[in-house]
Image (cartoon, rainbow, N blue to C red):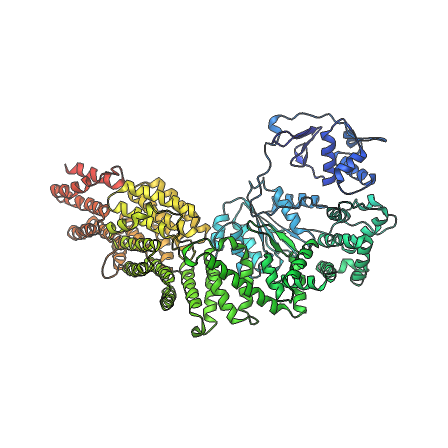
Amino acid sequence: MPDTNEQDSVIAFGPFRLFVKSRLLEKDGARLPLGGRALDILIFLAERAGEVIDKRELIKRIWADVNVDEGSLRFHITTLRKALGDAGEGSRYVVNVPGRGYCFTAPLLRPAASESRTSLPPASPPSLPSPLAKMIGRDDAVERISAELAQHRFVTIVGPGGIGKTSVALAVAQGELAAFDGQVCFVDFGALTDTGLVPGTIAAALGLTVNSEDPIPGLLTVLRNRRILLVFDSCEHILDELAPLAERLVREAPQLHILATSRESFRADGERIHRLFPLDCPPERDGLGIADILAYPASQLFVERIAESLSEFELRDEDAPLVAEICRRLDGIALAIELAAGRVNAYGIAGTASLLDSRFSLLWRGRRTAIPRHQTLSAALAWSYDLLPPAESATLRGLSVFVGPFTLEAALAVASCQGISEPAAVEAISNLLSKSLIATSPAERRLRYRLLDTTRAFVADKLVENGEADRVARAHAEYIRDLLHDIALKSTSMQSAGGFLPYADHLPNVRAALTFSFSERGDRTISVDLAASAAQFFLELTLLTECYRWTRQALASTDARAVDSRKEMTLQAALGVSVMFTQGNTEGVRSAFTRSLQLARELQDLHWQLWLLRGLHIYLTRVGDFHGALGIGEQGESVARKLNDPTATLNVEWMLGVAHHLIGNQDKAVRFCESAMVHNPGSQRLNIGHLGYDDRIVALVALARGLWLTGRPERAIEAARYTVREAELLEQPLTLGISLIWTIYVFLWVGDWDNAEILIERLIDHSARHFLGPYHAVGIGQKGELLLRRGDVAAGIEHLRRSQATLHAARHRIMTTVFATTLAEGLASQNQPDEALRTINEAIAQIPDHGESFDMPEMLRIKGDILARWGSAVEAEGCLRKSLDLSQRQCAVGWELRGAISLGRIWREAGKAGDARDLLAPLVARYQEGLQTRDLVAARELLGTLN
């Protein structure tokens, strides 16, 4: 019954249904556990139901390259019959034809089309590694763990090192893909040495960007309503940090499941422990034959691993007792068995057994059950290590310095400090790879290597014992420093983005190199150089917290006068960026940028000067110093002229346009920023330190808002939508957040509540997902404004107050006056005139002495409305006239129309309908588009009453 389509073919007989592709046997709809060999036999027989299959053909099909006798076949036939029922009933399905073979005799049923499985489980997400092609002796464990995971939500696989915990966890995870709709994420903690990075490691595995000192609240926000399985691997060294976090995740995310592997339990509330025991080994008794030992999974694993490397391998009867002995001596530890099998090619089974016996007899004889399992694995690794020639053992010791994957070039750099020539090191690495002491790690760009964690831990101890640890760590740090420096040069310094992204898998090694360099055993010269080289790397990967940590440490660890000017310039710039986006707009940000700019001028580096001016420009806009930002843009004009670079000139124009928009010069803002609509997004641009803060998108949001303010609402909507689409293409979290924050107002201003709501909810989710605290606060405030517009005033005020508190703490002043204005309007509608007036006056007072800001006309209008509402008509009229005058000076037709509507209503009540009509009608006539937007509809309705 070959499967000829993409559906999972079903073979039904009696109460059973056999799903061939899914390798699943069900009885009366319930899954029936069955070992891999027995299942292979059942599928083969059932697909040729009614035929007598010769025993030799069966053995060849099921055991492929491994030579076994009929005893093993009989054993698995017996297992299959037991699974299908008692001896009598089971024999009804699988019949032994003496002298010939076996036949599947049950009548087959044809299931209805709806009973067939129409698709395989969803494909594995990129974060879930591929499982072993064939896992031996763990089918029952996988079934039990899957059942426990469904019932308890938090299961830890506990067992000694090398026993196969990760393999079992991956098999469970693969089996659960369908149940979780593909939402299964693998988190490898094996390379993690800093427990403070545990939450960030989980976030990174989920594809989130960490920009917060405490990523846990954002992590919970993402996971709280998501059905997902997290697989935490190699947790034993970080349990103090991970256990309370896992407990909290399970408690606060009701649809989240956790499957962990560890050498000890978490001892956390709700945890279900599944102890993974060693593979069953043949007993110690005389007369064991091939069929006897292959009934035990430890021996099966040993024989299959030999057959994978020796295609002509044939297990002989005289070797069967030796195989049993080897498996027993290795206590059924999967990794130790595989290491031993890898040596059969060189020494044969008898030779392997003799080496094993002589090396481990003192450790294991008579007290195997009392020995800690990691000692058993360490002994196996020591045996394998002792077989290496000097060049290979020295190379392997040196490779223990790498955390996670490494390249051949990296390995050769470290090997050279061990006194090994490049040709000898290349040969040693090739040999270590063939002996399974080095593994390959798949990568898109080129081949990567890695040491298994247990191997790395073992040879790292040998590195220390040989007195080589500091020398190798220094060579490793120097290599990482030079690598990052070369990448920076290849990415043409500050003029292109994306240079470091292909090298993100070097992150664990960058961290390790920095940790050593700044330790007591490290070298301060290397540490400062390395931190400067790593600064751009961290910024481009949006690892802002780590960037801050290392740049601050580098600047604090040495006499500032002794630091190379260029390195200090790089460190100060990175410090300014990282502090600005993680801790808020502190004076430390201004200080760092100013010092870096001073050094750039001393070095006469125009590109760096322009880049730093851009950083200062961002900072000043965030703290509300819009005239200061304009001054920085004007300084940028001088630098761009010296560079004589069209790209630099364009970026300066956008800086000027953004500053003019925020000050309130809307006609100039549109003129400077309109080039962003036609500029080729693929050309090189001066991005803020590879951070993902795109100048063109910032210009586009200023343009969209400027178009509405200058009386072109339909073009504003078009530009706003275009801006968000362009930001999405860049895949930069900060840039997309900026595009959402500022274009949302276009939809709020025109009265398109539905689209505003969509973008606001997206902003809140996006900022939580990427731990962008101030952006999240802005989203909450914008949701408050939307609630006010829709009539839910109390909830709107509550959201606005929450937002204001966070933004004040972070000195994110660019939005505080905007939200204060909306809050005052809400308080007024709640009949709280005193608090409303106090709130709007405080907002107006935040604007510097020159009194210019993009939102000042609107603040004055709201103050006028509040005064008019409580009978202060004369004072209200004065505020509204100021609003109108300022709107006209700013070319802000949008604000002017709103001010005219408010003043027109006062004049109508005062009996001055003609004056109101003369004020309002010319403004409405200026609009050639957007006639159905909120303010124009209100203006025409008011004109109707005036007529």
134 with respect to 619 (left or right): right
Q: Position of residue 157 (x, y in %)?
A: 65, 51
Height in image: 92 above or below 603? Answer: above
578 or 184, nearer to the observer: 578
Residue at 73% in and 29% down = 48
Q: Nearer the viewer, residue 209 or 433?
A: 433
Q: Examine the image and state in which quarter residue 641 appears.
A: bottom left
> Total marks drawn?
0
Q: Nearer the viewer, residue 583 or 391?
A: 391
Q: Nearer the viewer, residue 47 or 899?
A: 47
Q: Residue 375's x, y, as percent? A: 72, 61
User: Is residue 413 rendered to the left or right of residue 891?
Assistant: right
Instruction: Name the quadrant of the N terminus.
Output: top right
**One can see residue 793 in this view:** no
Q: In the image, residue 397 lies at what x, y percent?
A: 66, 63
Placement of the C terminus among the 4 image quadrants: top left
Tell me the quarter of the picture where residue 68 sits: top right
**Residue displayed at 42% across by 74% down:** 561
